Image: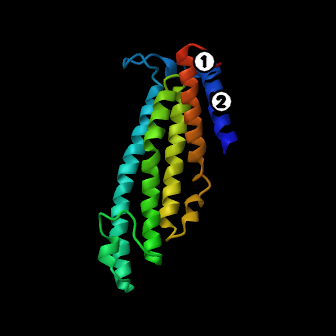
Amino acid sequence: MFAKGIAFALGGSYAERKFLPDMVPALFAQSSVAGLPQSYCLCLGSVAVYGFWLLNYSMKVGGARKTYMEKARKDGEKNVDLRYSLPNLYVEGNTKHSKAFNCVQRSHQQQLETIASFSAFVLIGGLSFPVTSGCAGMLYTLSRTFWAEGYAEGEGDASQRYSHPLSGLFWQALLASFLLTMMTCVETSGLFKFW
């Protein structure tokens, strides 16, 4: 995982600085907004798309709560209203329906735990490496989508979150975004310029 994330950050930033300006000069033209390169829209877009998708996904969690509450009632589980109703974040118990709902809830909660870091890394790293940071953000969003679907549709089997081949790539994308942020910090300090 670490090697792929490092390779993504270093390889992408190298290609962005050495080859892309000649191949697609419009990406590096100065935008009328804060003097940033036009390619910074990739960073803004990836963060916006992920935020919108996550907001939309939260509706799925609410729907799952109702669905599994009804299934639990139908199967004769005890204290269904008390266990499944808000403000409980997770459902107590070890039934198939409580496990299934808890996987849906956990898939959403875990993303809420990392959205601030993801957003900051993409937006800060994009100040120096907007194309690579934007691509990392898009990969993160795509991978998280597959990851959440596997988690939620696994009917209580948490290992299903990695059932899609792309579902684990968000870790590499997050690491690459962090490295790009650190590279931006070093460049901003004036100590060293990459590539």
Residue in the picture at 55% in, 41% down: 174
Residue 39, how many percent across, how many down?
48, 26
Within 10 angstroms of label 2, few (less than 14), some, or many (20 or more) residues?
A: some
Q: Amino acid at mark 2?
A: Leu
Check contact, mark 1 vs mark 2: CB within 8 A. Answer: no
Q: Give residue 102's quadrant in the image.
A: bottom left
Residue in the picture at 34% in, 58% down: 59
- Nearer to us in this view, 32 or 180: 180
Residue 192, how many percent across, how many down?
62, 15
Q: Nearer the viewer, mark 1 or mark 2?
A: 2
**Mark 1 or mark 2, earlier in chain:** 2
Q: Amino acid at mark 1?
A: Asp
Q: Which mark is residue 80?
A: none
Residue 65, how many percent across, how many down?
35, 68
The kind of secondary structure element at disc 1 is helix
Residue 79, how many percent across, how many down?
33, 80
Which quarter of the image is occupied by the C terminus? Answer: top right
In this figure, which residue is indicated by the disc labeled 1? 22
In this figure, which residue is indicated by the disc labeled 2? 10
- Nearer to us in this view, 171 or 143: 171
Residue at the farthest right position: 3
Residue in the picture at 45% in, 50% down: 111
Above or below, 9 against 22 in this view is: below
Find the distance from the CA under tag 1 to the CA under tag 2. 19 Å
Above or below, 4 against 112 in this view is: above
Above or below, 34 against 110 in this view is: above
The kind of secondary structure element at disc 2 is helix
Which quarter of the image is occupied by the N terminus? Answer: top right
Residue in the picture at 43% in, 55% down: 109
Above or below, 181 against 3 in this view is: above
Within 10 angstroms of label 1, few (less than 14), some, or many (20 or more) residues?
A: few
Horizontal placement of 95 versus 2: left or right?
Answer: left
